Image: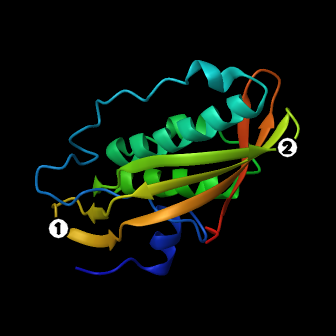
Amino acid sequence: MRTPRAGRWAAITFAAGLSAAACTTTPDAPTASATATATAPPMPAPAARRDAQGATSFASHWLDLVDYGYRTLDAGPLRDLAAPSCQACARLTEQLDRDKAAGASYRGGRIHFRSAVPEGPPEKQTVTALFDQDELTVLDRAGATTETVPANRTIFVFALDWAGTAWRTTAIKLGVEKP
Protein backbone atom coordinates (compact mmCIF):
# COMPACT_ATOMS: atom_id res chain seq x y z
CA MET A 1 0.00 0.00 0.00
CA ARG A 2 1.29 3.44 -0.93
CA THR A 3 0.54 6.75 0.57
CA PRO A 4 -0.92 9.26 -1.88
CA ARG A 5 1.26 10.86 -4.54
CA ALA A 6 1.37 14.63 -4.39
CA GLY A 7 -0.88 15.12 -7.45
CA ARG A 8 -3.62 12.72 -6.41
CA TRP A 9 -3.39 13.84 -2.77
CA ALA A 10 -4.13 17.39 -3.87
CA ALA A 11 -7.10 16.33 -5.97
CA ILE A 12 -8.53 13.70 -3.65
CA THR A 13 -8.01 15.88 -0.63
CA PHE A 14 -10.00 18.32 -2.54
CA ALA A 15 -7.48 20.16 -4.51
CA ALA A 16 -4.35 22.11 -3.73
CA GLY A 17 -4.06 22.04 -0.01
CA LEU A 18 -7.62 21.03 0.79
CA SER A 19 -8.19 17.90 2.82
CA ALA A 20 -10.02 14.83 1.58
CA ALA A 21 -13.18 13.28 2.80
CA ALA A 22 -12.81 10.19 4.87
CA CYS A 23 -14.26 6.75 4.76
CA THR A 24 -14.16 3.56 6.72
CA THR A 25 -11.93 0.76 5.49
CA THR A 26 -14.04 -2.18 6.57
CA PRO A 27 -14.43 -4.85 3.89
CA ASP A 28 -18.17 -4.24 3.66
CA ALA A 29 -17.87 -0.47 3.26
CA PRO A 30 -19.49 0.67 0.02
CA THR A 31 -17.27 1.52 -2.91
CA ALA A 32 -17.99 3.85 -5.78
CA SER A 33 -18.71 0.94 -8.11
CA ALA A 34 -21.04 -0.70 -5.58
CA THR A 35 -23.16 2.42 -5.12
CA ALA A 36 -23.07 3.86 -8.64
CA THR A 37 -26.89 3.75 -8.72
CA ALA A 38 -27.18 6.03 -5.67
CA THR A 39 -29.11 9.24 -6.17
CA ALA A 40 -27.48 12.59 -5.54
CA PRO A 41 -28.90 14.33 -2.49
CA PRO A 42 -31.41 17.03 -3.45
CA MET A 43 -30.73 20.69 -2.81
CA PRO A 44 -32.27 21.56 0.58
CA ALA A 45 -34.95 24.25 0.46
CA PRO A 46 -33.03 26.70 2.72
CA ALA A 47 -30.15 26.69 0.18
CA ALA A 48 -32.40 28.59 -2.22
CA ARG A 49 -32.37 31.66 0.02
CA ARG A 50 -30.15 34.64 -0.74
CA ASP A 51 -28.96 35.13 2.82
CA ALA A 52 -26.50 33.74 5.38
CA GLN A 53 -28.74 30.75 6.18
CA GLY A 54 -29.08 29.94 2.49
CA ALA A 55 -25.32 30.15 1.95
CA THR A 56 -24.65 27.92 4.95
CA SER A 57 -27.18 25.36 3.75
CA PHE A 58 -25.62 25.47 0.26
CA ALA A 59 -22.09 24.86 1.64
CA SER A 60 -23.37 21.92 3.70
CA HIS A 61 -25.10 20.52 0.59
CA TRP A 62 -21.88 20.95 -1.39
CA LEU A 63 -20.11 18.73 1.16
CA ASP A 64 -22.96 16.21 0.87
CA LEU A 65 -22.29 16.14 -2.88
CA VAL A 66 -18.56 15.51 -2.28
CA ASP A 67 -19.60 12.59 -0.09
CA TYR A 68 -21.91 11.38 -2.87
CA GLY A 69 -19.11 11.82 -5.42
CA TYR A 70 -16.76 9.67 -3.34
CA ARG A 71 -19.40 6.92 -3.18
CA THR A 72 -20.29 7.01 -6.89
CA LEU A 73 -17.47 8.84 -8.75
CA ASP A 74 -20.26 10.99 -10.24
CA ALA A 75 -18.85 14.51 -10.51
CA GLY A 76 -21.86 15.97 -12.33
CA PRO A 77 -23.76 17.39 -9.36
CA LEU A 78 -20.62 19.14 -8.05
CA ARG A 79 -19.79 20.49 -11.49
CA ASP A 80 -23.31 21.94 -11.74
CA LEU A 81 -22.82 24.04 -8.58
CA ALA A 82 -19.38 25.41 -9.39
CA ALA A 83 -18.63 28.69 -11.10
CA PRO A 84 -16.03 28.49 -13.90
CA SER A 85 -13.62 30.41 -11.64
CA CYS A 86 -13.54 27.66 -8.98
CA GLN A 87 -10.20 25.93 -9.58
CA ALA A 88 -10.51 23.65 -6.53
CA CYS A 89 -13.93 22.52 -7.80
CA ALA A 90 -12.45 21.74 -11.22
CA ARG A 91 -9.57 19.74 -9.73
CA LEU A 92 -11.93 17.62 -7.64
CA THR A 93 -14.36 16.90 -10.47
CA GLU A 94 -11.52 16.13 -12.90
CA GLN A 95 -10.02 13.65 -10.41
CA LEU A 96 -13.37 11.91 -9.95
CA ASP A 97 -13.75 11.73 -13.75
CA ARG A 98 -10.22 10.30 -14.21
CA ASP A 99 -10.71 7.69 -11.51
CA LYS A 100 -14.08 6.66 -12.91
CA ALA A 101 -12.61 6.30 -16.42
CA ALA A 102 -9.74 4.20 -15.01
CA GLY A 103 -12.18 1.83 -13.29
CA ALA A 104 -11.06 2.86 -9.80
CA SER A 105 -13.32 2.87 -6.76
CA TYR A 106 -13.20 4.50 -3.35
CA ARG A 107 -13.80 2.84 -0.03
CA GLY A 108 -14.75 5.10 2.81
CA GLY A 109 -14.29 8.83 2.45
CA ARG A 110 -17.50 9.67 4.33
CA ILE A 111 -17.86 13.32 5.28
CA HIS A 112 -19.35 14.35 8.61
CA PHE A 113 -20.44 18.01 8.66
CA ARG A 114 -19.82 19.66 12.04
CA SER A 115 -20.48 23.39 11.76
CA ALA A 116 -20.42 26.46 9.52
CA VAL A 117 -20.07 30.20 10.00
CA PRO A 118 -21.28 32.56 7.24
CA GLU A 119 -20.23 36.17 6.74
CA GLY A 120 -20.61 38.87 4.13
CA PRO A 121 -23.39 40.62 2.24
CA PRO A 122 -26.46 38.62 1.15
CA GLU A 123 -25.29 38.13 -2.46
CA LYS A 124 -21.63 37.28 -1.76
CA GLN A 125 -21.10 35.03 1.23
CA THR A 126 -18.00 33.44 2.71
CA VAL A 127 -18.85 30.25 4.62
CA THR A 128 -16.26 28.63 6.85
CA ALA A 129 -17.28 24.97 7.21
CA LEU A 130 -15.77 22.43 9.63
CA PHE A 131 -16.10 18.72 8.87
CA ASP A 132 -14.52 15.37 9.68
CA GLN A 133 -13.62 12.76 7.12
CA ASP A 134 -13.03 9.06 7.60
CA GLU A 135 -10.08 7.34 5.97
CA LEU A 136 -10.34 7.08 2.18
CA THR A 137 -8.91 4.08 0.32
CA VAL A 138 -8.51 4.19 -3.45
CA LEU A 139 -8.79 0.83 -5.21
CA ASP A 140 -7.70 0.09 -8.75
CA ARG A 141 -9.79 -1.79 -11.31
CA ALA A 142 -8.67 -5.13 -9.82
CA GLY A 143 -9.61 -4.08 -6.28
CA ALA A 144 -6.05 -3.59 -5.04
CA THR A 145 -5.40 -0.63 -2.74
CA THR A 146 -3.38 2.00 -4.55
CA GLU A 147 -3.62 4.88 -2.09
CA THR A 148 -4.87 5.78 1.36
CA VAL A 149 -5.82 9.24 2.58
CA PRO A 150 -5.89 9.39 6.39
CA ALA A 151 -8.92 10.48 8.37
CA ASN A 152 -8.88 14.17 9.17
CA ARG A 153 -10.72 17.23 10.43
CA THR A 154 -10.83 19.96 7.83
CA ILE A 155 -12.02 23.52 7.38
CA PHE A 156 -13.04 24.74 3.93
CA VAL A 157 -13.63 28.41 3.32
CA PHE A 158 -16.24 28.64 0.57
CA ALA A 159 -16.53 31.80 -1.53
CA LEU A 160 -20.13 31.86 -2.76
CA ASP A 161 -21.85 34.20 -5.17
CA TRP A 162 -25.58 34.51 -5.69
CA ALA A 163 -26.04 33.99 -9.44
CA GLY A 164 -29.57 35.18 -10.21
CA THR A 165 -31.58 32.42 -8.54
CA ALA A 166 -28.98 30.18 -6.89
CA TRP A 167 -25.62 30.04 -5.14
CA ARG A 168 -22.44 29.12 -7.05
CA THR A 169 -19.11 28.15 -5.54
CA THR A 170 -16.47 30.55 -6.87
CA ALA A 171 -13.54 29.33 -4.76
CA ILE A 172 -12.68 27.00 -1.92
CA LYS A 173 -9.65 27.42 0.29
CA LEU A 174 -8.27 25.45 3.20
CA GLY A 175 -9.03 27.11 6.50
CA VAL A 176 -7.19 26.93 9.80
CA GLU A 177 -8.84 25.85 13.04
CA LYS A 178 -8.24 28.38 15.81
CA PRO A 179 -7.42 27.02 19.29
Mark pair 1, 2: CA separation: 46 Å
From this viewpoint, which residue is outermost toward the left? 27
Q: Is residue 26 above or below residue 150?
A: above
Is residue 161 left or right of 64 when viewed as pictured?
right
Residue in the picture at 61% in, 69% down = 16
The mark that comes first in sequence, 1 or 2, is 2
Residue annotated with mark 2: 120
Residue 116, x across and y down, in percent: 62, 46
Q: Give the residue type at disc 1.
A: Ala
- Tell me the quarter of the image containing the C terminus: bottom right
Residue 157, x across and y down, in percent: 68, 56
Residue 85, x across and y down, in percent: 77, 50
Q: Give the residue type at disc 2.
A: Gly
Residue in the picture at 57% in, 64% down = 15
Residue in the picture at 78% in, 29% down = 51
For residue 55, what is the image quadrant? Answer: top right
Residue 81, x across and y down, in percent: 64, 36
For residue 79, what is the image quadrant? Answer: top right
**109 vs 5, nearest the viewer:** 109
Residue annotated with mark 1: 144
Residue in the picture at 20% in, 60% down = 25
**Dot 2 lies on which element?**
loop
Q: Residues within 10 Å of mark 1 (few under 14, many from 20)?
A: few
- Tell me the quarter of the image containing the N terminus: bottom left
Is residue 54 left or right of 132 when viewed as pictured?
right
Q: Is residue 121 visible?
A: yes
